[in-house]
């Protein structure tokens, strides 16, 4: 799970009286005060990395909020959409001289970086940024960018990070999203083929064949810590109240249940048995009261198994009968 703090730059001189003709505008005194307010707002938040646009107003905003000690990386793909002279950036050398604490290694001047872009070019760099967020090893990320870019990016990808109320952000406004690592759960057992996955649809949980079904359930681990987690399924097909659901075990049946109202919250733990293949062990809630990374066997209730003959998922209590193994598969 990654938490992303999207921040629009503070007020620049180009924001005063629509002075968009100003090139490389700096922050106004009001903009600097806005940065101080955000700095106080985030003072108890540990930011692992700051991604910042190469425009001076964004670099100033990042410096005023996070200082020189934060890991700050300038990336071209989150610059403003070019509409006016204020949206043109300076050369890399000028920026390095002004902000020598920033990592500019991925910024290049060997192309016409101030040319107005086509819609296809804009969409491409937004896709690049999305993939950068997905691939980033950091868990707490600040993104300092611009109104036009952030609006367009969040309108296209906001639903992936839990931001659905999309509007143009005010100067120094902060919008927080959570990026989950969604995956499919592939299974294998004696006599199976390579196309079977754990599915959840309209309250039912099953194993499905990708050659026969269009539905592709997406899962994530909601971690408790110490290798223990809930399994959450994205959008399980209901027309109404189609929210993420939890994999649960109720009345000897594997079901998906509402995260908020469920009284049967499952605690799962992966136990690797063969390469990337693992079994899913099921534990009592009491196991969360222990600090050990290795869960005490007395809390273990069983293991998630699939009966291919009866076509049902169940909890197997016999540790000697490992039949079903699981593996994460990319979406």
Image: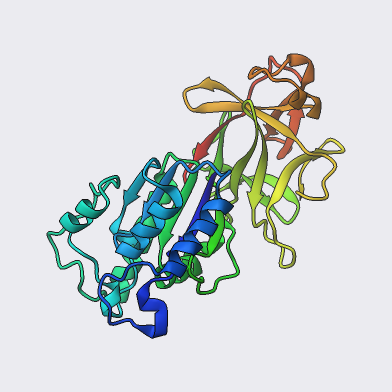
Q: Give the side of residue 250 with respect to residue 123, left or right.
A: right
Quadrant location of the N terminus in the rendered image: top right
Give the answer, above or below, for where 66 lies relative to 282.
Answer: below
Q: Position of residue 47 (x, y in %)?
A: 49, 43
Give the answer, above or below, for where 30 lies relative to 46.
Answer: below
In the rendered view, how is the structure colored?
rainbow
| Residue positioned 18% across, 58% down in the render | 94
Q: Give the side of residue 140 with respect to residue 70, left or right.
A: right
Please state which of residues 164 and 189 is positioned toward the viewer in this rendering: 164
Q: Quadrant of residue 295?
A: top right
| Residue positioned 28% across, 82% down in the render | 21
Please state which of residues 260 and 9 is positioned toward the viewer in this rendering: 9
Q: Is residue 316 visible?
A: no
Taking the view exactly as shown, the residue that stands out farthest to the right is 251
| Residue positioned 82% across, 39% down in the render | 264
Q: Position of residue 293 (x, y in %)?
A: 63, 19
Give the answer, above or below, for where 285 lies relative to 39.
Answer: above
């Amino acid at each position: 799970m990654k938490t992303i703090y999207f921040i629009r730059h503070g007020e620049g001189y180009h924001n005063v009286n629509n002075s968009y003709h100003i090139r490389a505008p700096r922050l106004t005194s009001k903009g600097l005060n806005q940065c101080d307010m955000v700095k106080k707002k985030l003072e108890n938040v540990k930011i692992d990395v700051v991604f910042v646009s190469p425009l001076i107003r964004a670099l100033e905003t990042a410096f005023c909020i996070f200082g020189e000690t934060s890991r700050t990386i300038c990336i071209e793909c989150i610059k403003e959409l070019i509409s006016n002279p204020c949206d043109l950036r300076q050369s890399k050398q000028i920026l390095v001289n002004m902000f020598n604490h920033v990592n500019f290694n991925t910024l290049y001047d060997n192309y016409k970086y101030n040319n107005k872009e086509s819609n296809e070019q804009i969409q491409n760099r937004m896709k690049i940024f999305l993939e950068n967020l997905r691939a980033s090893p950091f868990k707490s990320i600040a993104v300092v960018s611009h109104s036009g870019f952030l609006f367009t990016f969040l309108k296209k990808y906001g639903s992936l990070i839990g931001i659905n109320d999309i509007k143009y952000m005010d100067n120094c406004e902060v919008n927080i999203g959570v990026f989950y690592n969604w995956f499919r759960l592939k299974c294998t057992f004696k006599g199976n083929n390579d196309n079977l996955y754990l599915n959840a649809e309209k309250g039912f949980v099953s194993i499905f064949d990708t050659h026969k079904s269009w539905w592709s359930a997406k899962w994530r681990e909601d971690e408790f810590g110490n290798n223990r987690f809930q399994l959450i399924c994205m959008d399980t097909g209901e027309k109404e109240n189609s929210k993420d659901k939890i994999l649960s075990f109720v009345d000897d049946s594997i079901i998906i249940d509402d995260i908020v109202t469920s009284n049967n919250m499952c605690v799962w733990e992966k136990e690797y048995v063969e390469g990337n293949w693992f079994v899913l062990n099921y534990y009592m809630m009491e196991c969360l009261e222990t600090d050990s990374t290795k869960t005490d066997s007395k809390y273990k209730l069983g293991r998630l198994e699939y009966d291919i003959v009866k076509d049902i998922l169940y909890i197997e209590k016999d540790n000697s009968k490992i039949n079903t193994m699981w593996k994460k598969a990319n979406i």
